[in-house]
Amino acid sequence: MSEVNTDAQVRPREIIEAVRRLEAGELVGLPTETVYGLAADAENVQAVARIYAAKGRPADHPVIVHIHRAADLGHWASEVPETARKLAAAFWPGPLTLILPRKPGVADACAGGQNTIGLRCPSHPVAQAVLAIFKGGQGGLAAPSANRFGRISPTTAAHVHAELGDDLLVLDGGACAVGIESTIVDCTAQPPRILRPGQLQAADIAQTLGVAEADLLRPAESAPRVAGVLPAHYAPRTPLQWCSREQINARWEIGTSAGRRIGVLAFPPQPLAPHPSWVTLPADPAAYAQQLYAVLRRLDAAGLEEICVEVLPPSPAWLALRDRLTRAVHGSGR
């Protein structure tokens, strides 16, 4: 068995117990640098079915398989194009998922009925420690976000327990460093294309591959179905809407005067009188992303009538956050 190197919050014996349960076909809450995943053995059909049941996930919605290292790509993919190898070498371990042609008969339960597979090598030390010893380091873990389907992704162990109950073993790796889901790149297309934006920017991918950024972001007339791109996703139950700063100020003044319970998610500054329902997040996209889901969860649990989120900047650095919040707006209030 490999030596277990992990986060200070997770003891080695917890890692070993998690691996034991995963190899027995059970589910485990797993921290990654993006969000917490609900993990199961990707090659155990019954175990993957438990993920779908626990989340209420549609059967045709594929799940990403997490692997220990790029050298394992050939176990899962029938072909690994040079573009995929370049991206894995540049950005793995990290918040990047590669869509590749799937080997026949491999991880059928994760594919949503398709002949492609999404693969990612996470950088979180707890996820790496689990993958290093799961099936002798040769296995893969299906691990979509550990929450009910379509709802706000969890970025702490407490979020997972709140969603899925206290009976689930959750490895507490602290708050996720990235805070939003991985960038998904379709490597079955040439040139590759980004199907879901994330922290990893199109400009960085374009530079690595020597292609135009616009080509990576081109519309996909037909593309593999991937996780997290339905119009309604990442959503609070409280109605959420985009607002300009002027609209927020007006709604806040009128609403609070009328006794309405309004939440605000905005950039600084906040009103002179601090209020728990008015939350400011940094004007830096990475810092904003790291806090976003935790703040949305807090506001969603506050018994508010609506949440106003300030419109984000139009620059490419904010693309992934605009994507997540637009889907959250569409799915909110249900």
Image (cartoon, grey):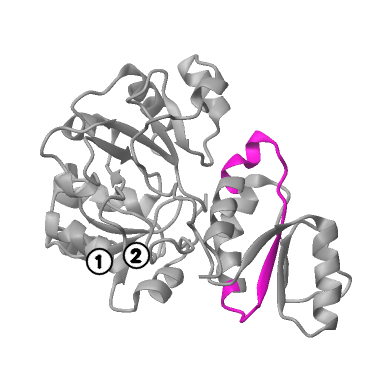
> From this viewpoint, which residue is outermost toward the bottom?
259
- Mark 1 residue crowding within 10 angstroms, few (<14) / some (14–19) / many (20+): some
**Residue 24 lies in what quarter of the image?**
bottom left
Q: Which residues are magenta?
A: 300-321
Residue sitting at x 48%, y 20%: 208
Residue 81 position within the rendered picture, expressed as x and y whole percent measured from the top left: 29, 20
Residue sitting at x 21%, y 65%: 17
Question: In the rendered view, does 161 fall on the left or right side of 41?
Answer: right
Report the front residue among 334 and 217: 334
Pointer 2 residue = 171
Question: In the rendered view, does 155 fall on the left or right side of 223?
Answer: right
Residue 318 forms part of the magenta stretch: yes
Can residue 1 be seen in the rendering of this structure?
Answer: no
Residue 302 sits above or below residue 244 on the image: below
Circle 1 SS class? helix
Task: Please name the amino acid that badge 1 sits on.
Answer: Ala
Pointer 1 residue = 53
Can residue 67 be seen in the rendering of this structure?
Answer: yes
Return the mark for residue 234: none
